[in-house]
Amino acid sequence: MIRQGSAEDIPKIEEINKVVFGEPCGIAGRAGSRKDFRVSVAEENGRILGYVCGHERKGKYYLWMGCVLPEARNKGIGTALLKHQMNVAVKAGYTRVFAKSSNKWKPMMRLLLKMGFDVIGYKAREWGDEAAVWFEKVLQEG
Ligand SMILES: CC(C)(COP(=O)(O)OP(=O)(O)OC[C@H]1O[C@@H](n2cnc3c(N)ncnc32)[C@H](O)[C@@H]1OP(=O)(O)O)[C@@H](O)C(=O)NCCC(=O)NCCS
């Protein structure tokens, strides 16, 4: 089941981040400090399997972070989470959605391209030595 997440889900999301990224990734800080922070979660039998979250950035909806636990991948959960977040963004009035990824996260880049995102930029050393590829899509409900 994909649903809108709440503050109660944040500690569980931090645990997922520790598994996938090796650290909590500042989710609690951003969720607590931004009123426009929104998160979609995938849940099965009370267990969160993955999430995608975002907020406003320069007039666009910025898909900031997301992941699915390794054992739950390749079943369509990542796709469903992205769609859910994009519908949340449409309902909040956004017309464009923006995301960043990198060579380290190729499955996410494949997913964004499959879902109709365009590559709009590249920035060397966006995260330390790591470069970022920037993606954007015009939003449509559905
Ligand atoms: C990117 C990520 C969220 C994708 O999650 P996911 O749940 O595996 O995504 P999906 O299942 O929707 O799609 C993944 C693949 O499975 C395929 N798939 C979807 N449903 C499927 C099904 N029922 N049967 C077989 N394959 C399926 C998709 O077509 C896609 O194929 P591709 O890799 O060839 O493009 C996940 O890989 C992840 O957490 N990666 C590490 C963290 C990360 O990269 N975060 C983003 C940082 S920018």
Image (cartoon, helix red, strand yellow):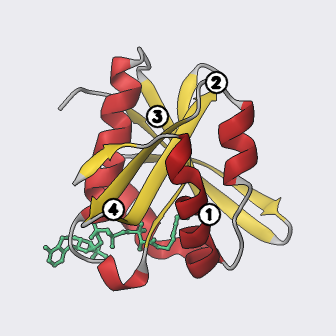
Q: Which mark is residue 14?
A: 1
Measured along the vertical axis of the image, is residue 124 above or below residue 93?
Answer: below
**Residue placed under numbered mark 3 in the picture:** 97
Q: Residue at x 71, y 73 (%)?
A: 23
Q: Of marks 4 and 2, which one's residue comes earlier in the chain?
A: 2
Q: Residue at x 42, y 18 (%)?
A: 92
**Residue placed under numbered mark 4 in the picture:** 78
Q: Is mark 2 within 8 Å of ligand 1?
A: no
**In which quadrant will I find the N terminus?**
bottom left
- 10 Å crowding of disc 1: few (<14), some (14-19), many (20+): some
Q: Nearer the viewer, mark 4 or mark 2?
A: 2
Q: Amino acid at mark 4?
A: Gly
**Residue placed under numbered mark 2 in the picture:** 35
- 10 Å crowding of disc 2: few (<14), some (14-19), many (20+): few
Q: Amino acid at mark 2?
A: Lys
* Element carrying mark 4: helix
Measured along the vertical axis of the image, is residue 28 above or below residue 47?
Answer: above
